[in-house]
Image (cartoon, helix red, strand yellow):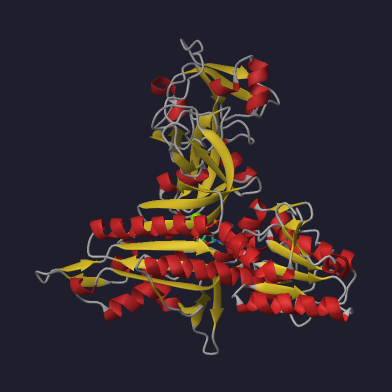
């Protein structure tokens, strides 16, 4: 491709909302263009990279036995009503109406449509298992679209679905997909980790996420170096957290704590550790108020709490609601004497406390010396502590390491959640009818490319891993107006194309400085510079974007050297 004919305009202008480096570099290198919040055009240079990834994804999925199809982006509400998600899915679901006022949505995912397809075609165990996927635009009306393609509203996702006769068959496909994902991310040259994950509103019994390690990642992950337990902190648990020393508990006392609302203030005032306080947070849910209790020095895992409660919506209660429920301002709630109609869920970490301190459900007062059996009302115990790096591994007890990651893929065992609701059944070899166990497998195409840039860049621009590079080789002619130089560059370009190399030919009539800067910015892995001075010595210059070390090579040796370099750099 000749740059002079290609549509690629780099820019120095970076929008103020571009907080992460991949977003800035994608804008600057002309890969994407914003149309509205979280909605982007994939410009030709960016589209090529998304296509390269899609090709890798297709290759690995087909090898693992999956078949591609393409479903509509606009889906009828009836199917979503059948699954119950028309009501359950929150504001992220973009609901639209046609001219007859019929309800539709723009697909955020496609369990309903695929299940409808399979229930119409498949009736016998002989037709199973089935594994289908598509690569298609999704829409989710994210509350905070940001980071460019990393968290868009419209975004390109590969979504796959499998259908089975039994759980053993589902396990097999799940394993096969997990391995295919590993091969995909390895083929992209990414540093990643597979972690246990929460199943979210997609539902199901078991799930793993694929995390690309990056400082700017939105997900927090803990991992055990000893036994390799790894989990998203939304899902992670811990066991054997050291309990703080017990405090005197012979009798409970009401003590004045004027103005001390936070755990910090209370523990300073009473000269105790924050961990000896039972922190009580009130949440609103569709089933009413809930009190969540956790050690004063720790945070609540709201996902775990939501799952334990089995609710759809969970938000911190407003100040008025707290006041109405406890009779006290925010900061003084506690499990002692709390209105019995409020469901109380306590983390296992506070169970071992003795002589603990809590808000007294009245302004400017706390209780000290509390005991669970004697003082608290009915409490449900659950693991709702947000696990932090340093906490003991739930499997082997070694302190967990923490890191940040970008979730690029997510696979789930759905079980029969959708097949039951949509009556997607088959007859077994004895003529008995069963719902099909299902799996589903998502992979963010745009997010993965963004993650690759997060991991591969320097201060001058992108350093593409070859498999995702929009082009593999850049030929840069320094003085295109010089007929001799331009003829030599044309010849190199032609012979590289002939050899099947994916090459961008910077034949623009621009100053060398501009071309070098652009080359660094757009980050094509191999660069060939053709200029008058080196040609006079019978050479052109080859370099890798990664180290930019220059190698003088005779023009007729360029193709073989480039092919050598490319095959050595498989990712
Ligand atoms: P997140 O927790 O980041 O919101 P999710 O759990 O909602 O993601 P899934 O439903 O598991 O995402 O979607 C499968 C994959 O699609 C994700 O692993 C991610 O790579 C990609 N993805 C999800 N939401 C977005 C988005 N808003 N923008 C870009 N890619 C996304
Ligand atoms: Mg997810």
Note whether 481 is above or below 152 in the view shown.
Answer: below
Q: Nearer the viewer, residue 333 or 56?
A: 56
Determine the residue located farthest toward the front in the rendered image: 537
Determine the residue located farthest toward the left in the rendered image: 430
Note whether 261 is above or below 124 in the view shown.
Answer: above
Residue 46, position as x, y percentages in the image: 67, 70
Count all numbered tags in the image, as a single digit: 0
522 sits left or right of 359 in the view: right
Note whether 306 is above or below 513 in the view shown.
Answer: above
Image quadrant where one finds the N terminus: bottom right
Name the residue located 38 percent from the left edge and 32 percent from the top edge.
395
412 sits left or right of 387 in the view: left
Q: Nearer the viewer, residue 421 or 164?
A: 164
Q: Which of the 4 image quadrants contains residue 449?
A: bottom right
Quarter of image, ligand 1: bottom right
Note whether 456 is above or below 221 in the view shown.
Answer: below
565 sits left or right of 245 in the view: right
Image quadrant where one finds the C terminus: bottom right
Q: Which of the 4 image quadrants contains residue 424?
A: bottom left
Name the residue located 38 percent from the left edge and 22 percent from the top edge.
373
Q: Nearer the viewer, residue 328 or 384?
A: 384
Q: Nearer the viewer, residue 352 or 118?
A: 118
Can the viewer see residue 183? yes
Can the viewer see residue 84? no
Residue 547, position as x, y percentages in the image: 72, 51
Residue 563, position as x, y percentages in the image: 60, 66
Name the residue located 37 percent from the left edge and 51 percent from the top edge.
206
Determine the residue located farthest toward the bottom in the rendered image: 99
Residue 411, position as x, y percentages in the image: 42, 57
């Amino acid at each position: 491709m000749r740059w002079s004919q290609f549509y690629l305009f780099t820019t120095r202008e970076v929008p103020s909302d571009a907080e992460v480096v991949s977003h800035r570099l994608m804008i600057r290198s002309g890969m994407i263009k914003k149309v509205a919040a979280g909605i982007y055009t994939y410009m030709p240079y960016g589209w090529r990279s998304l296509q390269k990834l899609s090709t890798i994804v297709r290759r690995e999925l087909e090898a693992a036995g999956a078949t591609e199809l393409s479903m509509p982006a606009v889906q009828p509400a009836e199917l979503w009503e059948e699954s119950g998600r028309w009501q359950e899915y929150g504001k992220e679901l973009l609901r639209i109406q046609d001219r007859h006022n019929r309800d539709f949505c723009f697909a955020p995912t496609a369990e309903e449509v695929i299940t409808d397809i399979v229930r119409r075609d498949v009736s016998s165990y002989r037709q199973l298992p089935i594994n289908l996927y598509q690569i298609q635009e999704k829409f989710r009306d994210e509350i905070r679209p940001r980071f460019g393609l990393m968290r868009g509203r419209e975004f390109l996702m590969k979504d796959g679905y499998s259908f089975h006769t039994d759980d053993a068959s589902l396990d097999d496909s799940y394993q096969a997909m997990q391995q295919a994902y590993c091969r995909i991310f390895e083929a992209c040259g990414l540093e990643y980790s597979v972690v246990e994950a929460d199943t979210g509103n997609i539902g199901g019994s078991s799930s793993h996420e694929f995390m690309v390690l990056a400082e700017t990642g939105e997900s927090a992950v803990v991992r055990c170096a000893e036994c390799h337990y790894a989990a998203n902190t939304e899902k992670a648990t811990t066991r054997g957290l050291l309990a703080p020393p017990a405090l005197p508990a012979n009798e409970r006392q009401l003590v004045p704590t004027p103005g001390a609302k936070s755990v910090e203030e209370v523990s300073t005032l009473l000269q105790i550790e924050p961990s000896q306080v039972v922190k009580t947070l009130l949440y609103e849910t569709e089933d009413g108020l809930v009190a969540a209790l956790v050690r004063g020095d720790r945070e609540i895992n709201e996902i775990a709490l939501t799952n334990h409660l089995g609710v759809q919506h969970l938000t911190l209660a407003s100040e008025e609601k707290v006041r109405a429920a406890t009779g006290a301002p925010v900061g003084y709630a506690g499990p002692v004497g709390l209105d019995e109609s409020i469901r109380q869920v306590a983390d296992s970490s506070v169970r071992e406390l003795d002589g603990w301190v809590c808000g007294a459900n009245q302004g400017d007062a706390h209780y000290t010396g509390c005991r669970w059996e004697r003082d608290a009302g009915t409490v449900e115990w659950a693991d709702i502590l947000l696990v932090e790096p340093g906490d003991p591994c739930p499997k082997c007890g070694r302190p967990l390491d923490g890191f940040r990651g970008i979730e690029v893929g997510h696979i789930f065992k759905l079980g029969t959640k959708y097949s039951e609701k949509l009556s997607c059944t088959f007859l077994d070899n004895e003529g008995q009818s069963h719902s099909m166990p299902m799996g589903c497998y998502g992979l963010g195409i745009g997010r993965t490319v963004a993650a690759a840039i997060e991991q591969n860049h320097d201060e001058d621009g992108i350093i593409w891993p070859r498999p995702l590079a929009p082009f593999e080789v850049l030929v840069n002619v320094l003085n295109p107006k010089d007929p001799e130089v331009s003829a030599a560059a044309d010849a190199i370009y032609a012979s590289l194309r002939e050899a099947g190399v994916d090459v961008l030919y910077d034949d623009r009539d621009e100053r060398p400085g501009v071309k070098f800067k652009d080359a660094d910015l757009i980050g094509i892995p191999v660069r060939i510079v053709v200029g008058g001075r080196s040609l006079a010595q019978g050479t052109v210059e080859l370099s890798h974007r990664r180290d930019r070390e220059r190698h003088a090579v005779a023009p007729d040796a360029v193709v073989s050297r480039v092919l050598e370099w490319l095959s050595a750099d498989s990712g």
